[in-house]
Image: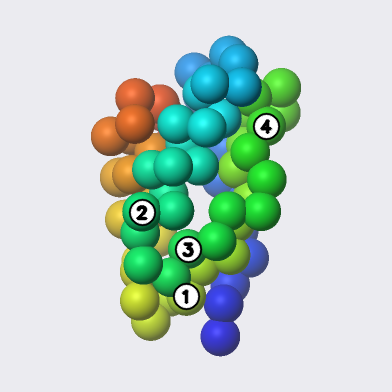
Amino acid sequence: MSERVTIKIEGMTCGGCENSVKTALERLDGVQVLDVSHAEGAVELLYDPERVDHGALTDAIEEAGYDVAV
């Protein structure tokens, strides 16, 4: 069963940033990105917690060069 989550992200400034975040997250097994918005500073996605944990999501965002807001 997939879970829907919105993660706040700091440091995105353009469409290229959105694409970087989307690409990094979609490389993970069990993740479907629904929307990425640099204007809102957030990504909305579905993920399968049996295939990927929340920590892997934040790690992928940070490895792409952005900060996850708490």
Sooner in the amino-acid sequence: mark 1 or mark 3: 3
Sooner in the amino-acid sequence: mark 4 or mark 3: 3
Sooner in the amino-acid sequence: mark 1 or mark 2: 2
- State the image coordinates of residue 11 (x, y, percent, origin top left): 49, 18
In front of the other: 17 or 8: 17
| Residue at the (60%, 43%) spot, across then down | 43
Extreme right residue here? 39
Q: Amino acid at mark 3?
A: Val
- State the image coordinates of residue 18 (x, y, percent, origin top left): 56, 30
- State the image coordinates of residue 65 (x, y, percent, origin top left): 34, 25
In front of the other: 70 or 31: 31
Q: Quadrant of the N terminus?
A: bottom right
The residue identified by callout 2 is 27
Q: Amino acid at mark 1?
A: Asp
The residue identified by callout 1 is 48
How packed is label 1: few (under 14 Cα within 10 Å), some, or many (20 or more)? Answer: some
Of badges 1 and 2, the one in the foreground is 2
As measured in the structure, the alpha-carbon distance from the residue carrying label 1 to the one carrying label 3 is: 7 Å
Q: Which mark is residue 37?
A: 4
Q: Which mark is residue 31?
A: 3
Answer with the quarter of the image where residue 3 lies. bottom right
| Residue at the (43%, 70%) spot, across then down | 30
Viewed as shown, does residue 39 lie left or right of 53?
right
Sooner in the amino-acid sequence: mark 2 or mark 4: 2
Location of residue 13 with respect to 62 vertically, above or below: above
Are the residues at dot 4 and dot 3 in contact (C-beta closer than 8 Å)?
Answer: no
Q: Secondary structure at mark 2?
A: loop
Q: Amino acid at mark 2?
A: Arg
Q: Secondary structure at mark 1?
A: loop
